[in-house]
Structures are given as C-alpha cells and as structure tokens.
Image (cartoon, rainbow, N blue to C red):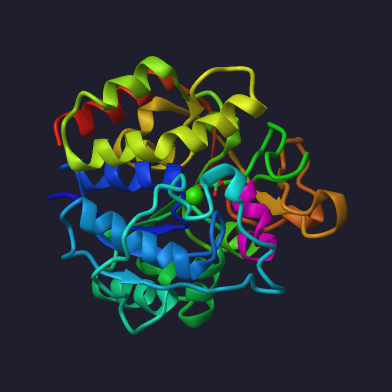
Amino acid sequence: MPRKIIIDTDPGVDDTMAIFFALCSPELEVVGLTSIFGNVHTELATKNALRLLEIAGRTDIPVAAGAVDALTGPFEGPVPFVHGADGQGDIDLPDPAGQALDISAAQFIVEQLRAHPGQITLAPVGPLTNIALALRLEPRITEWVDEVVLMGGNALAPGNASPAGEANIRNDPEAADLVFGADWQVTMVGLDVTLRVHMTPEHIAEYATHGNAMSDHIVKVLPHYRNYFESVYEAKGIFVHDSSAIAYILDPTLFTLRRWPIRVGTQGLGRGKTWPATGGRILPPWEGRPLVNVCVDVDGERLVEMEAEVLRKA
Ligand code: RIB
Ligand code: CA
C-alpha cells in the first residue's frame, strides 16, 4: 500500500520538483497539497499548486489554501530573485482551470488525519504556519499523524535567509517552535543536508531528455533558480532542498540522523535559528521537549540519482 502524504508547500521551483518527485513515486499517495506563503504570497502558491497538478495530469488531488500571514505578524514578502515573481522562474504560465477547496489548509489537514489515523505523513516544505494552526485547531492530530518530515532549519550549518536562519523557519519561527515542541515524531531535513545534495548541470541537462510534461516543466523553471544559486554559491547547478524531504520519506537510509530537542530563536539576530540541544546537559528551554530526528549527513549523489530515475520513468 502506498504511503499517504500531504505536502504543505510554497511553490517555488524546488517545491515544484518535490511535488513531481512525490507524484511520480509509486510508493507514495499524495492525498492533497496545502499552500502557504514563503517563496510567493499564499494566493499565488495556491494557484501554482493547482497549475502543477494540471501539468502532472493529477487534478484528482485537492488543494487547500493556507494562511496568508505568520502566527504573530505579517508575511515579510516573497523572494522573486530566487524563484521568479511567479514562483516558477518567470515563464508566463496560464491561469489554472481548477480551484482550491472551500476549507482552509489547517482544516484539510485535520480532516484528513482524523479520517486516516496513523496513515498520513505530513511533508511541509514551506513555513510551518499551517501545521501550527492545525495543531491549535485539533491537538489530537499528534496522535493521528504517522510522522512529520519537514524541509527547514539548520542545526549545525549557517542559515540562508539570514546568517542565523533558514528561509522556511525564519518566515514563521513561532510556528516552527510549536511544531518542534509538539508530541509527535518530527524529522528535520534542513540545510545541514540539503546543501550537500548537489544537482549538477549534467544532471539538469538529463531532465530535457525525459520527454514528459513534468520534466519539461522542470527544465523551463530551473534557469532562473539556477542563476540565483550560481550567483550565491561557488558550485554550478543547484542544491536540492524540498525534494530531499521527499527522498527521506522514500528512503531514510540516505541520511544520517542525530536526535536532539530543538528550540527556535524568535528574537533579534537569532530569529529563525533552529537550536539543537547538542551539549550533554539539557537546559531549561529544551527541558521536556521531544527528540527531533535531525538529518546531519546524506548520500547526495544517490539522492539526486533517485529523483532523476523517478522522473525519467514518469
Ligand atoms: O531554505 C530552503 C527553503 O526555502 C525551500 O523550501 C525553498 O522552497 C524556500 O522556500
Ligand atoms: Ca519550499
């Protein structure tokens, strides 16, 4: 039986790749996409989620629109210099034909977890606001979820949205602190590993040979994103953020884990930093907090190959 997942997403170029990776993996059943601000505003994230499902020919999968602002303040704004103003590399996509459900992302998550206790993995690859709102709406979702596997955070690595914080966590640190503190199994696939998953120009070129609608879309949206990476990092190509969380769900043996409680910095320069309790002694802010699976190493080459193989067969 395929494993059911809900992808909470801010598409986003790397979100696009992660969504297609999941849709094309026979081991997974995507029961819904929920949208969130981050790379773009929520309204556009919702549109993009619908567009991506149309490109994939999977309009049977519902989309629920998420929160438009963080728990404690307004969304600080999109990042067109990374993902394009449209979140899809500025490629002038038509509007989607479909529409989102008339329930919120948080309601959708609660309803699905209630209906399928123990069967659904949450895969947030954007800011964690919807997940925190779902926890507030129905705290028993911690009992009903299978696992939470998120892309976000930086335990030992520096941040990417600031020297301290990773983008998804920095967009709503209060929500992230709630999610890391809830009584469920969270796995953090953060910058510690995603910056070690290198998709080279050769890997990217191979997608153009697949001859399917999803790989063709990836080829179109990647150049803008790739330019950003090549201007910031020394390597050519891109690093693989959101698809790494999907890869963990498919094959956790790709990763090396440490288990630490996590607190999230919410103030000043450290806002958005995920702090693992790495020392021997657990200090009061971390006391009583659950152990998070923190990915600290990865077989990046195998991961990139696995994703390409899945899309090649699509
Ligand atoms: O830091 C990487 C994360 O931020 C990814 O989820 C990417 O899509 C961006 O939103
Ligand atoms: Ca994302």
Relative depth, front residue between 140 and 112 = 112
Relative depth, front residue between 210 and 257 = 210
Relative to 221, 38 lies left or right: right
Percent of width and height locating residue 83: 52, 46
Q: Is residue 187 above or below residue 198?
A: below
Q: Is residue 290 above or below residue 277?
A: below
Residue range of the region highlighted in magenta in the rendering: 167-176
Is residue 295 at all visible to an observer of this figure?
Answer: yes
Residue positioned 22% across, 58% down in the render: 54
Residue positioned 25% across, 36% down in the render: 215
Percent of width and height locating residue 223: 45, 33
Residue positioned 30% across, 30% down in the render: 307
Q: How many marks?
A: 0
Q: Which of the image's four quarters has the C terminus?
A: top left
Relative to 242, 95 lies left or right: left
Percent of width and height locating residue 67: 52, 74
Q: Quadrant of residue 159?
A: top right
Percent of width and height locating residue 222: 42, 35
Q: Quadrant of residue 122?
A: bottom left
Residue at the front extreme, as displayed: 92
The secondary structure making up most of the magenta span is helix
Is residue 35 at all visible to an observer of this figure?
Answer: no
Q: Quadrant of residue 142?
A: bottom left
**Residue 263 falls inside the magenta stretch:** no
Relative depth, front residue between 169 and 249 = 169
Residue positioned 58% across, 50% down in the render: 80
Residue at the bottom extreme, as displayed: 102
Relative to 135, 22 lies left or right: left
